[in-house]
Image (cartoon, rainbow, N blue to C red):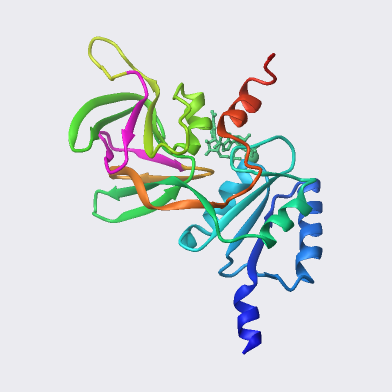
Amino acid sequence: MTQTTKFSDEIKVAIIANGKYQSRRVAAKLFDVLRDDPDFYLTKRNPDVVISIGGDGMLLSAFHAYERELDHVRFVGIHTGHLGFYTDYLDDEVDKLIDNLRKDKGDRVSYPILNVKLTLADGRSFTSLALNEAALKRHEKTMAAEVFINGVAFESFRGDGLSVSTPTGSTAYNKSLGGAVLHPTIEALQLTEIASLNNRVYRTLGSPIIVPKHEKVTIYPKRVGSYTLSVDNKTYTNRNVDKVEFSIDEHKISFVATPSHTSFWERVRESFIGDVEE
Ligand code: NAP
Ligand code: MN
């Protein structure tokens, strides 16, 4: 029976890396060390921990590869290159990561993700999860749509499109759209306009809106034609879209809690401002 006990103590680890030389080197090193270590078991299937090596873009891919296993999976991001938002370890900190995993008690840090449900005119619907954001645009010509917030007919939108972002996605596309940077412990969604057309006939609020947990944003496109829905790093095109609903999902993304966690505000400063004189 000792073997069974031993087996359940192992941490099942999946390693996923982008194509960069530096990332592949880190992946090879991790693989070499973990393969022969009785505390770890390397597997792509049903892992406890997914180690993503690369940048935030790589973590997005890792998230989508394991998005159906959010109940038991925890992620770790190793950044090769600059500091990211979803990455906790530098590429020269692999030993520190292994050490921390060995002492791991299952502690996690979790953040909200977005549930996006697209319904077609024929009633069929497709649900996806987003870690950063989902943006709806019309393929050709201006998008015209009715926007409802929690059942309230809020505004008639005209313009390029609308984006709904998660708190951790607020520093990505949302920020380029003039959205606010939201601390990831705030469980809310952010709706931002993409080049809205405003004049005396067409009026939208014009500023980003922060919607609390349990409230839903619904967009009803008014015109026929094809619409593109970008969900993080993927884009889907559909005709005859009846509505797209956005809400905070019941699941969250979890990261392995790191003792030396870089604070969110440090990351924001590092990424967008640089060094500050003290
Ligand atoms: P990409 O176009 O190759 O890279 C987008 C950039 O955004 C990368 O530098 C990436 O960092 C960074 N990034 C990703 N998530 C972030 C976050 N939560 N906070 C701050 N920066 C973040 O595309 P990709 O790597 O596949 O990532 C897809 C994401 O790109 C989308 O979810 C969207 O947010 C963003 N995007 C932004 C714009 C825009 O700002 N105009 C337009 C389209 C898409 P790394 O270098 O570390 O990977
Ligand atoms: Mn990228």
The vertical placement of 192 against 12, above or below, is above
Tell me if residue 233 comes above or below residue 128 in the rendering: above
> Front-most of 85 and 216?
85
The residue nearer to you, when weighing 236 against 215, is 215
For image coordinates 40% across by 31% down, the residue present is: 140
Quadrant for ligand 2 reads: top right
Choose top left, top right, bottom left or bottom right for residue 51: bottom right
Quarter where residue 207 is shown: top left
- The picture places residue 228, in percent across and down from the top left corner, at 42, 40
Q: Is residue 265 above or below residue 246?
A: above
User: So how many labels did they put on this image?
Assistant: 0
Q: Extreme left residue here?
A: 152
As drawn, 70 above or below 42? above
Residue 124 sits in quarter: bottom left
Where is the N terminus found, in terms of image quarters? bottom right
**Residue 196, image x and y in percent?**
36, 20
Q: Position of residue 271 (x, y in %)?
A: 64, 27
Between 186 and 132, the one lying in front of the other is 186
Magenta-colored span? 206-230
Query: Which residue is situated farthest in the bottom direction here?
Result: 1
Q: Quadrant of the C terminus?
A: top right
Residue 141 lies in the magenta stretch? no
On the picture, is 75 further left or further right than 223? right
Q: Is residue 214 magenta?
A: yes
Is 13 displayed left or right of 137 in the figure?
Answer: right
**Which percent across, then down, holds residue 109?**
52, 49
* Side (left or right) of 3 relative to 116: right
Q: Nearer the viewer, residue 254 or 104?
A: 104
